[in-house]
Image: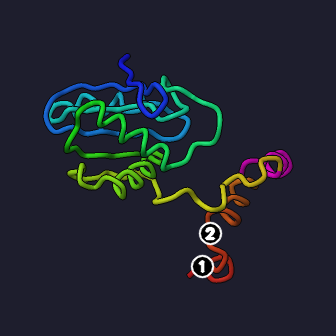
Amino acid sequence: MPSAYVNGINIHYEYQGSGLPVVFSHSFTSDCTMWTQQTPVITQRYQFITYDIRGMGGTDSPPGEYSLNQHAEDLYQLVRHLGLTEFVLGGLSIGGMITVHFALAHQELLKGIILADSAAARPEVPHLVNPEEVIQIAQSRGMAGLAEHMVRNRLLAPHLLDNPY
């Protein structure tokens, strides 16, 4: 399991294949093994590099809050350590958010980006503002009631509640 000491932490990464480097960031609460099934296909044409973001998998988890800019700087220091000068960067969920922040700061290094199920920034309103409320709704109304609550209160824009069409 290779790792690089960069930006004050040890970052675990994996790589296989040869060709144009393709670097992928994983989703929240996951690690670089989430790309295991894609690896055989991608490595037929590319060098595929995956890594564990700060606080996940085999990468160090120092105390304190982590920011998207900090994650992007971790990635920048990792690609410098690996000697990458041109590559494709992709990510899923928070990995996509890291990709966007990295691209804004270091677009000269990128041949392209791949975003999957992501956003440009962390939502201002977390999906679980009050976890106790979510637990109480699930216990009193069941999962169907919780699903209805989440759709009405977390997924739909307020103006769509009165006029969905």
Pick whichever, 100 or 157, lies toward us: 100
Q: Which of the numbered marks, if any, corresponds to residue 57? A: none
Residue ID at (65%, 38%): 64
Left or right: where does residue 162 sit relative to residue 134? Answer: left
Q: Can you identify the residue that label 1 sits on? A: 164
Reply above or below: 137 against 64: below
Check the image and name the residue furthest to the top.
1
Left or right: where does residue 79 sit relative to residue 86? Answer: right
Q: Earlier in the sequence, mark 1 or mark 2?
A: 2
Pick whichever, 1 or 69, lies toward us: 69
Reply above or below: 65 against 103: above
- Packing grade of label 2 (10 A; few <14, some 14-19, many >=20) is few
- What stretch of residues is rendered in magenta? 133-144
1 and 2 marks in contact (CB < 8 Å): yes
The amino acid beneath tag 1 is Pro
Residue ID at (17%, 35%): 46
Image location of residue 90, percent across then percent down: 33, 46
Check the image and name the residue furthest to the front.
8
For the N terminus, give its image quadrant.
top left
- Packing grade of label 1 (10 A; few <14, some 14-19, many >=20) is few
Magenta segment includes 135: yes
The amino acid beneath tag 2 is Leu
Q: CA distance from mark 1 to mark 2?
A: 9 Å
Image location of residue 19, percent across then percent down: 13, 34
